[in-house]
Image: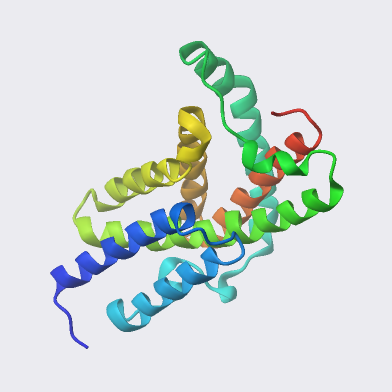
Amino acid sequence: MNLSANLKTALSFLVIVFCFFIPHYARLTIFLYPLVILIVVWLYLKYISKENFGDLFFSFRRFEIRAIWTGIIAAVLLSLFFQFAWDPLINKILPAGKIDLSDFSGIRNSPVNYIIILLLALIVGGFYEEIIFHGFIFTRLEKTFRGRWATIAAFIITNIIFGAYHFQQGIKGILLATIAGAAYHVLILKFNRNLWYGIFFHAFFDFIGLTLIYLGKMS
């Protein structure tokens, strides 16, 4: 099936919209919507753009042990930045604002729920969100813009979309997610567009936040 460039672009944007809204409004469980969306993306890659997940920077062959410890170090540094630099600043600008973490309230005082949510943070936050946002959405935008500034424009818009995707957490949550998403993305690009670096960075950053919630240090 040979499609025009304009039609491919239109279909890619439809898939991006699908990826953004389905998790929030389709009433699918967190166990189901990632699978549905990944299947749609796979179908798009296979039959529309003639690509595979390797073109989204994800390949098991590109796995590197270094990505794990690099992700741990980056996650710790980012957490310290938010705690000691970003939080004091944003609390002065938006003193009444609060990140809505009610989705994770069930892990407090529940070791079982805590372990489950850590696994989901790795699978959904790490693998799924990185493949979709910093893999699929970024590459679609980069291909759309083309030219000298394509990568920068795609980078900025991708991470604005990633931040907006966390709208249920309020304005502070959106801003935090935008900055964190940009940090994951920088690491991916720095290491030759290897998504494994973003996956582990994202997962370990979530691990730190979830552990703080579990311990009652973050509400």
Front one among 20 and 75: 20
Q: Position of residue 32 (x, y in %)?
A: 57, 67
Report the residue at 49% width, 62% height from top.
Answer: 131
- The relative height of residue 101 versus residue 141 in the rendered view (above or below) is above
63 horizontally vs 2: left or right: right
Front one among 159 and 65: 159
Report the residue at 14% width, 68% height from top.
Answer: 6
The quarter in which the C terminus is drawn is top right
Front one among 80 and 109: 109
In the displayed image of the protein, which residue is found farthest to the front? 27
128 horizontally vs 83: left or right: left
- The relative height of residue 132 versus residue 77 in the rendered view (above or below) is below
- The relative height of residue 9 versus residue 118 in the rendered view (above or below) is below
Q: Quadrant of residue 212?
A: top right
Q: Position of residue 167 (x, y in %)?
A: 45, 39
Report the residue at 72% width, 52% height from top.
Answer: 117
Identify the image's colour scheme: rainbow, by chain, secondary structure or one colour: rainbow
Q: Quadrant of residue 178?
A: top left
Q: Position of residue 206 (x, y in %)?
A: 65, 45
The quarter in which the N terminus is drawn is bottom left
Front one among 50 and 97: 97
